[in-house]
Image (cartoon, rainbow, N blue to C red):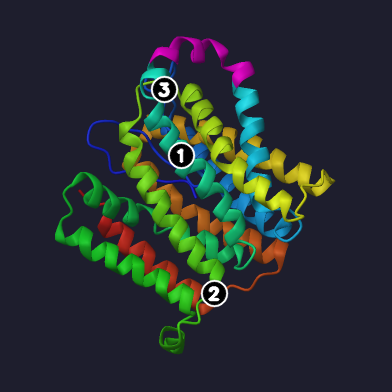
Amino acid sequence: MPETEVQQSSSIAPAPVAAPVAAPVSVAAPATRLSPVVASALLALAALGWSGNHIIARYVGDKVPSWSLNLARWVVVAVLLAVFAWPALRADWPQIRRHWMVLAFLGAIGGGIFGALQYVGLRYTTAINMGVMNSVAPALIALASFLIFRDRVGWLQAIGIVISLSGVVAIVTKLDPNVLQTLGFNGGDLIIVFNMALWAIYSACLRLRPRIATTSFLFTLAVSAAVVTLPFAAIEYAGGARLHWTPETVGAVAYAVLISSLLAYICWGRGVDTLGVTRAGSFLHLVPLFGAILATSLLGETLGLHHLVGFGLILAGVTLAVRR
């Protein structure tokens, strides 16, 4: 799930990564400013890319070990960026070395743990659930920014957060109050809820990152994510789970690297440069829309009333939560 951020002084916009990890905007202004129409198209393309990653992760769920897949994803991203973004990395190296702890933290939770847990969660729940619950991210980010940095949260924002979370409850419980009484939640849904909270912390903390180029930031994020993921992938391997390089596996890694980890970030960053983080954040609601279309047409999943009610509550809550 891409991301939107509550920022004090900078415009660095997150995204969802199995989604999506963060999609930071370059500190320097882009060489050419895009038209609003082109920027909107790029933001929609980024949302489509992240939605597709949910579908692929759901499809390969039981066939591919989650932590190993996430490790392969970030290793490939790091290698590609090391090769093609070397000038920016060399120029930013003093800042990277000075702020390595912040960069390592962001990569660990935003790329390593978050990315892998999305794959884990999609083993036990549907891609539709994943897409819809990603929409609660802006409200959770506002809450995380308040708890960590004491950003101001007005009454409307607080009400919006509560409404958005009620939408998540509607989806998790499938509008069945007996689920609350028996605590019979779907394990995958609970993983997704926890993961979105983790994503909110990551998004709120992005303001701490040093002023370095987008490619340099993505490289450090990829390296940190790979390092954190490695021990869990080793445990998977020791337990007998193997990442076999079948056409399905290669396709899943290629999509995660090229589409959801590189192309979508570039599209999102350029779109935010033009429209701003607040206007761009509304495009995150295309993720559940695209996800529902892809999941019902490609995976045969069923769109239920609880999805529609939950999405309506989340959309209403986020509309209040992101107001200034």
Which residue does the image show at 49% across and 80% down from the upper left? 174
Q: Earlier in the sequence, mark 3 or mark 2?
A: 3
Q: Earlier in the sequence, mark 1 or mark 3?
A: 1
Query: Is residue 47 visible to us here?
Result: no
| Above or below for 30 versus 49 | above
109 horizontally vs 143: left or right: right
Where does residue 170 sit, x and y in percent of width and height? 42, 76
**Quick check: marks 1 and 3 in contact, CB under 8 Å?**
no
Q: Is residue 65 left or right of residue 315?
A: right
For disc 1, the marked residue is 22
> As displayed, is residue 174 above or below residue 129?
below
> For the residues carrying marks 1 and 3, which lies nearer the camera in this image?
1
Mark 2, residue position = 186
Identify the residue at horizontal 77%, vertical 55% (top origin).
240
**Looking at the picture, which amino acid does disc 1 mark?**
Ala
Residue found 81% across the figure and 47% down from its top: 244
Per the rendered image, the range of residues in magenta is: 82-94
Q: Residues within 10 Å of mark 3 (few under 14, many from 20)?
A: few
Give the vertical position of 303 relative to 134 (above or below). below
Residue type, numbered disc 2: Asn
